[in-house]
Image: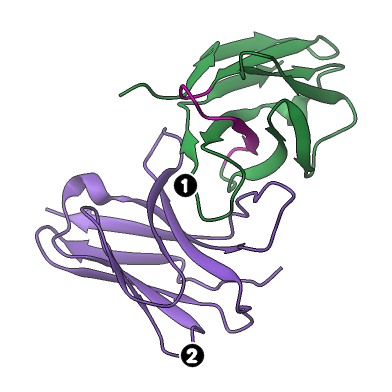
Amino acid sequence: AAGVIQSPRHLIKEKRETATLKCYPIPRHDTVYWYQQGPGQDPQFLISFYEKMQSDKGSIPDRFSAQQFSDYHSELNMSSLELGDSALYFCASSWDRSSYNEQFFGPGTRLTVL
Amino acid sequence: DAKTTQPNSMESNEEEPVHLPCNHSTISGTDYIHWYRQLPSQGPEYVIHGLTSNVNNRMASLAIAEDRKSSTLILHRATLRDAAVYYCILRDVGETSGSRLTFGEGTQLTVNP
């Protein structure tokens, strides 16, 4: 069965650079979520989209922005990168935004900021 | 948001049952109880969820207390592959803003061969 695809899997950037992370949800899933997991931390919700509209916003820095496109894939844009942005970034997708639907997670993008 | 409390760590032997507890004394009537797990170097993975009644699926069973203030995830026969961090998460069925998952401090399960 198709799973959530994230690219790239690994990314190394310098401070103050920008980064773009991509997420391709499972086919026919219309809701995408982004989570950040710092070293030794639990995943933290950043932002979500339902039918191409932002549906919920968590602890996402103003330096970050995201969107969901017409084909339902999503991109997380990160600017003015800081050392503290080094983390695993997970994307998840679900059938819709209902709270009883399971979220399917991708393998994550490991971002390292030097 | 209603909070959950789980033990930091638990240990089990392979092929034995494992009972992972979760306390959620401030649960509301519209909160679903979800369990996810995260294996090393992987994204979180859905395990099971329920509202009031006990639930079974191919991965595990979920036993929910009658007052809903606690629940227990049951792995019937632990395998080495079950070693992971297990998260108990409450999700409000009435939430329309996107139903984020709020991960707390889960339980690190160690399975001994």
* Quarter containing the N terminus of chain A: top left
Callout 2 amino acid: Asp
Work out whether disc 2 and disc 1 sit on a shared chain. no
Q: Colour of chain B?
A: purple
The amino acid at mark 1 is Glu
Residue lying at 66% horizontally and 72% vertically, measured from the top left: B2
- For the residue labelled by badge 1, is the local secondary structure a helix, a strand or a loop? loop
- Location of residue A88 in the rendering, given as x and y in whole percent from the top left corner: 58, 29
Q: What residue is disc 2 on?
A: B67
Outermost residue to the bottom: B67
Question: Would residue A110 be found to the left or right of residue A47 on screen?
Answer: left
Q: Name the residue rendered at 46%, 81% in the picture.
A: B70
Look at the image and give the residue range highlighted in magenta.
A25-39
Residue A20 shown in magenta: no
Q: Where's the C terminus of chain A, which quadrant?
A: top right
For chain A, give the colour.
Answer: green
Q: Is residue A31 left or right of residue A65?
A: left
Nearest the eye: B76 or A68: A68
Q: Mark 2 — on which chain does it sit? A: B
What residue would you read off at disc 1?
A: A102
